Amino acid sequence: MHTPVVSKGPNVFIALKNWGLCILLPYLNYLFCFHVTHLVFRFSFFAFSVSWLTWLVFILTSLLYLGCYKFMHYLAREGMDLNADSGTSEHIKDLILLTVIVQGLAIFTDYFWFFWLLAPLRAVYILWVNILGPWIFAEPPESDMDPKKQRKMERKMKRAGMM
């Protein structure tokens, strides 16, 4: 797939916006196909093992699909590149694909829903790598005080019993 090239004018934004909406179509197909497949197989062929938990998770996946699609549609409408290698759209696409795979496997047993716990684990990992880890292990800033003020501060701290 290639990004459309429009050189100038207001058509640049319109072309990019339409390009972003075209990227959403395969994900919409995944959502619809797996959701209908799960509905048909799980609630007809494997109906003997359907419980209230199965219905609850089915409704949660429906809400998650709707929320992810609406969010990506909003990002595309605002002109954001949905094909970027990093960023919010990439995380949303990963969440959609994880849910599609888990829902496909959960046709056979409800225990596959535990793989859905990979999403918060990945979120914690990204939070640690990008925000918490660098913040915790960052070098302390150098003091900007001149040596005279530094010695005075050290004497005050020694008198107060802090050193």
Image: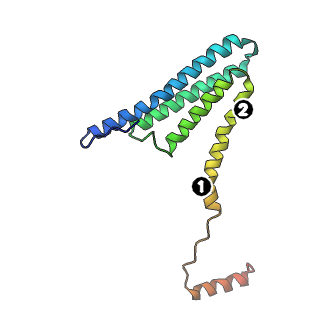
In the image, 56 versus 109, the foreground residue is 109
Name the residue nearer the viewer: 65 or 30: 30
Q: Is residue 40 above or below residue 75?
A: above
* Disc 1 packing (10 Å; few <14; some 14–19; many ≥20): few
Say if 57 sits above or below 5 in the image.
Answer: above
- Judged from the image, the secondary structure of the residue bearing numbered disc 1 is helix
**Amino acid tagged 2:** Phe
- What residue do we see at 39% from left, 39% from top? 78
Instruction: Identify the secondary structure beneath mark 2.
Output: helix
Q: Quarter-wise, where is residue 159 in the image?
A: bottom right
Q: Residues within 10 Å of mark 2 (few under 14, many from 20)?
A: few
Residue occupying image coordinates x 73% and y 22%: 109
Residue 131, which numbered label?
1
Q: Read off the residue under disc 2.
A: 114
Q: Nearer the viewer, mark 1 or mark 2?
A: 2
Where residue 131 appears, as percent x and y from the top left, is 59, 55
Q: Where residue 137 sits: x, y (%)? A: 65, 63
Tell me whether the residue at label 1 lies in contact with that at label 2, contact meaning CB atoms closer than 8 angstroms: no
Residue 163 in the image, given as x and y percentages of width and height: 73, 80
**Distance between mark 1 and mark 2 Cα atoms:** 27 Å
Q: How many dots with numbers? A: 2
Q: Residue at x 62, y 16 (%)?
A: 39
Left or right side of 146 for 163: right
Q: Quadrant of the N terminus?
A: top left
Q: Amino acid at mark 1?
A: Ile
